[in-house]
Image (cartoon, grey):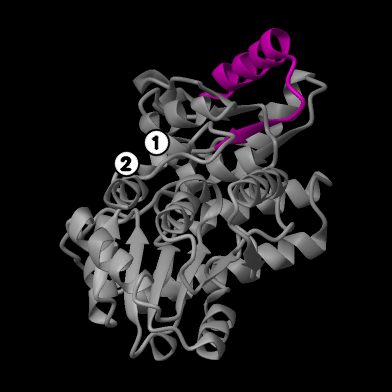
Amino acid sequence: MKYMHPRPSSIVAALYTARDLDVDVSILHGPSGCSFKHARLLEEDGMRVLTTSLADNEFIFGGQKPLEDVLRYAEEHFSPHRMAVIGTCVAMIIGEDLTSAVENTGIVTPTIAVDIHAGYSENIAGVLATLEAAQVAGWISNEELVRQRNLMEKANEVERLRGAASAAYIEPSRGDLKHLAARRLIECARSGHTGVAVLNAKKETAYMFSDELIALHDACPDADITYIANLADRGLPKVRADAKRILDEMTARNVDCEIIGALDEYGANGETLGQRMRELSPSFALLCGVPHAIPPEFTQGIECFSVTNGPRQVEPLRAIGHRHVIVEIDLHPKTLGVREIVESEFGAVLRSLA
């Protein structure tokens, strides 16, 4: 399918994966403006992102020397534990040999080279290219690489079936008014009916999506609600550390969760979550993070309050019968670089109404 709305970039996906591998410095081999916004955001998350700032003359004559210079600069000035060189469209078009550049520098810092560009139809190409390089370098096991491939395939499948990749063009939407959805959710929770609150979030987005579960518990502490979260201790180093922090804070704030899945298993988690919801037979459900991972046969007949950070996820969620769809529009910038749960807009509204 040819998408006519913007889709995630494989280059950016490679950068985020390098961060999850505890890379201290990533070097974008391309123009200074390539992936500018995400590079700046990732620096808020503790990973330095440098650029070789290729200009028009390097487009013609090659940019190996600038890359070697930046690699030496990074090692000398930052003493990194790990580095990654991330390719761009320019590097691909002019045929840059990233691995050769790394080897020629004489640096001693463990460094991987990721040949990637933004021309892939799915951004998981950037994830897999980075993980494959990491496996060759001995940073992850072959078993973890196989696991990650399976997870990426499942995540892609969910997006194609019920997500932002399910149509050539999806109109963006800010979703329902938060105070109306919050008022109805509190009514359901205080009605005496059985409910379920599910965190099925993608990686660091859980730092805010988890707040919706805490806020519901704050507002209705005695309600008959089962809390479930994908906070198992599995995945790449940063993913596991984030899961532990979030689970510890939720427990400290009196929210006891059943654990189903890990933070990188959001796409593969839907069937298991759906089966558990079927066992609980709730009349209402708060679904936060990637609600569309749960197949619609498990949510039929349930009044769903679904919270996403994707404006183009609103229409697909409504199409599969989710009655209330709420968008945390500025979630991603607010969850980069944090190490504790961040209050959400919907959570703040729930608390104010309670």
Real-space Cα separation, disc 2 to disc 1, in angstroms: 6 Å
Main secondary-structure element of the magenta-colored stretch: helix
Nearer to the camera, 302 or 4: 302
Position above or below: 346 against 112: below
Q: Position of residue 334 (x, y in %)?
A: 41, 36
Where disc 1 sits, the SS reads helix
What's the residue at 52%, 24% (across, down)? 63
Residue topped by disc 2: 330
In the image, what residue type sits under mark 1? Pro
Nearer to the camera, 82 or 224: 224
What's the residue at 79%, 19% (across, down)? 106
What residue span does the magenta drawing correspond to?
63-86
Q: Position of residue 27 (x, y in %)?
A: 57, 27
Q: Which image quarter: residue 219?
A: bottom left
Q: Position of residue 77 (x, y in %)?
A: 68, 8
Res. 310 visible in picture:
yes
Q: Which image quarter: residue 300?
A: bottom left
Residue topped by disc 1: 333
Q: Is residue 73 magenta?
A: yes
Position above or below: 112 against 316: above
Q: Which image quarter: residue 305?
A: bottom left
What's the residue at 54%, 65% (across, down)? 266
In contact (CB < 8 Å): disc 2 and disc 1? yes
